[in-house]
Amino acid sequence: MRLPALAHVVALAGRVSLAVRNVRAAYPELSPIQADGLQPPLPAQKCSEGTCRSASASARLLYSCLAACSTKLPKVLLIDELEPSESAWTIFPAIPYFSDTYGRNSSWIFFCEEETTISLPKLLMTLQKFEKSKNWFLGRALHDEESTIIHHYAFTENPSVFKYPDFAAGWALSMPLVRRLSDVLLRDPPSSDFTIDLKHEIALYIWKKLDGQELTHVKQFCSEDPTSSKAAECATAFNSALPVCGSPVQKEDMFVAIKTCRKFHKDRVPVVKKTWEKQATHYEYYSDYADNTIPTADLRIPNVERGHCGKTFAILERFMELYVGRMSWLIIVDDDTLISLPRLQKLLGCYNPHQAVFLGERYGYGLQAGGYNYITGGGGMVFSREAVRRLMNSKCRCYSNDAPDDMVLGMCFSSLGITVTHSPLFHQARPTDYAKDYLAHQIPISFHKHWNIDPIKVYYKWLGQDEEKQQHGQKNLKQEL
C-alpha cells in the first residue's frame, strides 16, 4: 500500500492548556512516540513557562517521521500558540487559518493531545483508507449513555445515537471538510455563549451545519495505554498516568476551603467527612451560620441561591490575612464536590506556587466575541499563593454577592493577563454525565453533585482507590510482620 506523502498531513499537538503559553508550570516529560522501535532519549525536564510539554510532543512526532519517512516532515502546530490565544483552544477560530494556510498543499488536519502517542506509519496507513477528496470527520467515537447537562440534554430520547470524538485518541478532518467548515464558520459562527465540552460541541456544530456530517469511527485511533498489548495495532494511544514531576506537594502546604450553608449541614457535610476530609490537614467549612459541631466559620455573607461570589472573595481575603504566608495552595470546593487530594498533590508537584497558577476544569464564555476563560467552580478551583496575591492586590471584585464566582474570577484573571490552566481530570458533573469510554482512560481528581447518586459509593469507586490500595498494603505488611 502506498502511503500518502508526509507533506499531506498536518499534525497538531498542544490543544490542552496544560501546555498553553504563560502557564507558569513545571511539566513531566511524556512517553516517546513509537515508530519502528525508535524511542528518542528525551529526559524529564522542568519548564518555567510551561512550554516543554508541547515542544516534546512536537519533537517526538518529528523523531517518528525521521525513523519512518524519507519525504518532507509533517507540519506540527501548537494550538495554544495560535491567535487569538484566549479562544484558540476551541478550534473554531483556527479553522479558517487552516483552510487558508494548508488548504492547497495538505490533505488532512490531525488533532491530538500532548499525552497522545502516535505511530506515524500506522497513522498514514490509516488515513490512506479514506479518499482525501471527500468530506471526512474521523475519530474514536464516544456517546452518552443518558442525556446530560454538560451537553444541554441533547438527543434526550436516545443520547447514544450521537457520536463525538475522543480527543485523547486523536481526530482528523479531511481538507475538503476543513474548507467547507471554514466557509460556514465565517457566515454562521457558533451561537452559544458557553464552551463547556468542546469535543461534543464541535461534532454537534459539524452535524448541524454540514448537512448531517457524522463522525466516522476509526478503530486504529485508540486511547489504550501505549505500553498495553491492546495498543499494538493502533495508530495512536494515550498516556493516562498522573504526571510525575518529583515529590507531590505536601498536604500541609495546601489549604482547603469548603463552601456550604446551613441547609446543607446535615446533608452534604457528612459526605465530606466520610470521604475526603481526612485527606486534608488544613481545611475550613465556610457557611452563613456558625455550627460548632462541624465546625463552620461564619463569613458574615448572607447565603444566596446561586453565584456565591461574595462568599468566595471573603474566603480569598481570609486566606490572604491568615494563611498566604504559610501555605502555597488554596483549593476552593463546594460541599457536594468529591475530590482526591492525594492525586491533586501529585498534579500540583508540576506547578510553581511562586507563579500565578489558576487550575481546574476550563470553560469559556463569549470566546467568539472577545470573551474569557474560567475555571468552573463545582470541580474545584486551585489557586497558587501568587495567584491569590495578584488577584487580591487588584481592584477586581464581585459586582454582587450572588454573581457567579467562577465567571467573575475568570474575568479578573483575564484582566490581569493570567491564563487559566485546564486539567480534564477535574469534573463539573457526576461520572454518569460523561461517556464511559472517556472516563476509562482517566485517573480523575474530582466530580461534582450528589443528585441521583450515592456520593459515598461514587467517591470510593472513582476517587478512593488510592486509599483502599494503601490500606490493603498496610494490612498485608502487618500480616507479614
Image (cartoon, grey):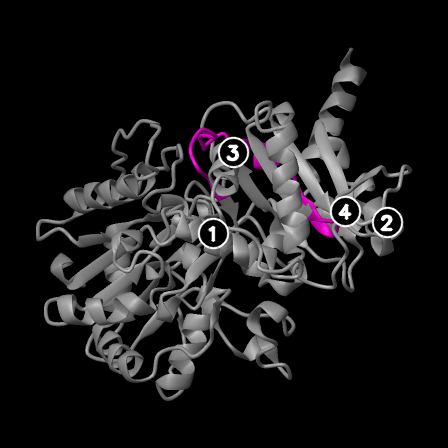
Q: Where is 17 relative to 184, above or below?
A: above
Give how far apart the Cα atoms at labels 1 and 4 are. 23 Å
Residue 278 position, x and y percent, is 76, 32
Residue extent of the magenta highlight: 334-358
Report the residue marked by disc 2.
Answer: 265
Residue depicted at 78% across the width and 23% down the height: 475
How many residues crowd around disc 2 within 10 Å: few (fewer than 14), some, or many (20 or more)? some
| Dot placed on the residue nearer the N-terminal end, 4 or 2 | 2
Name which quarter of the figure residue 25 lies in: top left
Q: Is residue 307 left or right of residue 477?
A: left
Furthest residue toward top: 481
Closest to the camera, between mark 4 and mark 3, is 4
Q: Indicate the amino acid at tag 1.
A: Cys
| Dot placed on the residue nearer the N-terminal end, 1 or 4 | 4
| Dot placed on the residue nearer the N-terminal end, 2 or 1 | 2
Report the residue marked by disc 1.
Answer: 412
Closer to the camera in the image, 430 or 212: 430
Report the residue marked by disc 4.
Answer: 300
Closer to the camera in the image, 311 or 463: 311
Residue depicted at 66% across the width and 46% down the height: 333
Q: Indicate the amino acid at tag 3.
A: Leu
Residue 251 position, x and y percent, is 64, 27
Q: Secondary structure at mark 2?
A: loop
Q: Is residue 91 left or right of residue 239?
A: left
Contact, mark 2 vs mark 1 (Cβ under 8 Å): no
Q: Where is 273 relative to 11, above or below?
A: above
Report the residue marked by disc 3.
Answer: 348
Residue 309 position, x and y percent, is 63, 55
Give how far apart the Cα atoms at labels 3 and 2 are. 30 Å
